[in-house]
Amino acid sequence: MILVTGGLGFIGSHACIALRRAGHKLAIVDNLANSKLAVLERIRDLAGGDVAFHRADIRDATALAAIFGRDPVEAVIHFAGYKAVGESVAKPLDYYENNIGGTFVLLKTMERYAVRRIVFSSSATVYGDPQRLPLTEDHPLGAVNPYGRTKQFIEVILKDRAIGSPEFRHATLRYFNPIGAHPSGRIGEDPRGIPNNLFPYVTQVAIKRLEKLRIYGNDYGTVDGTGVRDYIHVMDLAEGHLAALKFLLDKDRSITVNLGTGRGNSVLEVVNAFERVTGIPIAREFAPRRQGDVASCYADVSLASRELGWQTKLGIEDMCRDAWAWQSANPRGFPE
Ligand SMILES: NC(=O)c1ccc[n+]([C@@H]2O[C@H](COP(=O)([O-])OP(=O)(O)OC[C@H]3O[C@@H](n4cnc5c(N)ncnc54)[C@H](O)[C@@H]3O)[C@@H](O)[C@H]2O)c1
């Protein structure tokens, strides 16, 4: 059985479908801190098979032990954590407690039950301000906010754990910018409150939940002055987890690897693609740069291709189409 922490969240829910469809037996652990129970039924429908669910907090050692004690766990895929950069600046202790504290309890429980494989959701944010592009995995790390530092610290903890115990293996996946949704439109990104990220903002302007898109900065040294990011379709990212899991189960080593497309798109390119695909105009205004935002960020994906045999298949128009299928069918997100 594969234990998936945070499996009801945006990326976890899509990964669970890919994993279940590939024949893995799954159990999700989620405390619903940033997700809704309605996601579970949809995962089960789309995955075409049963998926076990435990409502629990990964910081709760007793609850985790009960779950690990029930069914042998082959490997863990660890999505659970907080992820909002701005909130992490305002509430750093909550972020350190949940992200690092939660991972610590999880790793201790894995040790106790001799579970020695973990796929971890890291982030391109660990690189901080890029010194060169595309970003290769050996680029120096330098996260510039508490959220990013939680990811950077957890990476160190995983490396130390692997040094101390050679049979322990981790696949640390540095995601770039996941967007899009399952092509059915039944699951997708459902942020609480005003979205922090570009794409849910765009789709919420399109359904008229928000009035207009604010684009932070149009004076960067990029193709059109707006920020450039490596957007990756969440279904491609989900497949990346399958490849990482296979790597851990087949090979006798750990890996830290970028998951992106290797291509950058500017904010305006993404908004224009969305308008082209959906035919819906997106009202927009330019605002000053946001502190901490970098001009451009995109991945070198050669390691993922070489080691995991994985590469993305979907482009920016697929991401726009599928995100819109989700948002237009679920204008208020998942039901309570
Ligand atoms: N979405 C992105 O842009 C992005 C980019 C890079 C990395 N990541 C990382 O990928 C992972 C998944 O991201 P996401 O976008 O799906 O986020 P998400 O918030 O949608 O999903 C995280 C899930 O974890 C659960 N959770 C949080 N704390 C928990 C706890 N203590 N115990 C049990 N469950 C808990 C939440 O309820 C939620 O369902 C996160 O670790 C995030 O930091 C996300």
Image (cartoon, rainbow, N blue to C red):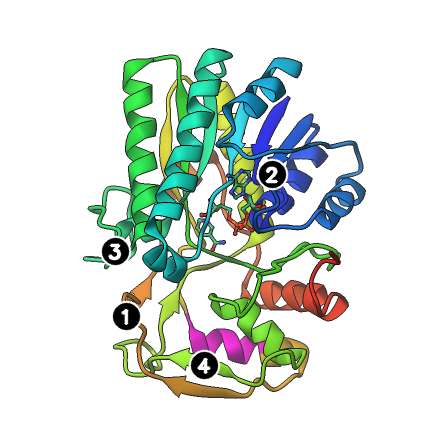
Q: Classify mark 2 as within 8 Å of ligand 1 or not, answering yes or no.
A: yes
- Name the magenta segment's main secondary structure: helix
Query: Which of 29/265 is in front?
Result: 29
Q: Earlier in the sequence, mark 2 or mark 3?
A: 2
The residue pinned by badge 2 equals 30
Q: Secondary structure at mark 4?
A: strand
Q: CA–CA distance between discs 2 and 4? A: 32 Å
Say if residue 263 shows up in the picture: no
* Residue that appears at 51% across and 12% down: 113
Q: Is residue 99 above or below residue 162?
A: below
Q: Are marks 3 and 4 in contact (CB under 8 Å)?
A: no
Closer to the N terminus: mark 2 or mark 1?
2
Instruction: Report helix, strand or loop for mark 2.
Output: strand
- Residue 12 sits inside the magenta stretch: no
Ranked by sequence position, the earlier of labels 3 and 4 is 3
Give the magenta part as a residue range: 266-274
Mark 4, residue position: 214
Task: Pick the quarter of the image with the C terminus.
Answer: bottom right
Residue at horizontal 33 percent and vertical 13 percent from the top: 165
Q: Circle 1 is placed at which residue position?
A: 291
Q: Amino acid at mark 3?
A: Val
Q: Which residue is mark 3?
A: 144
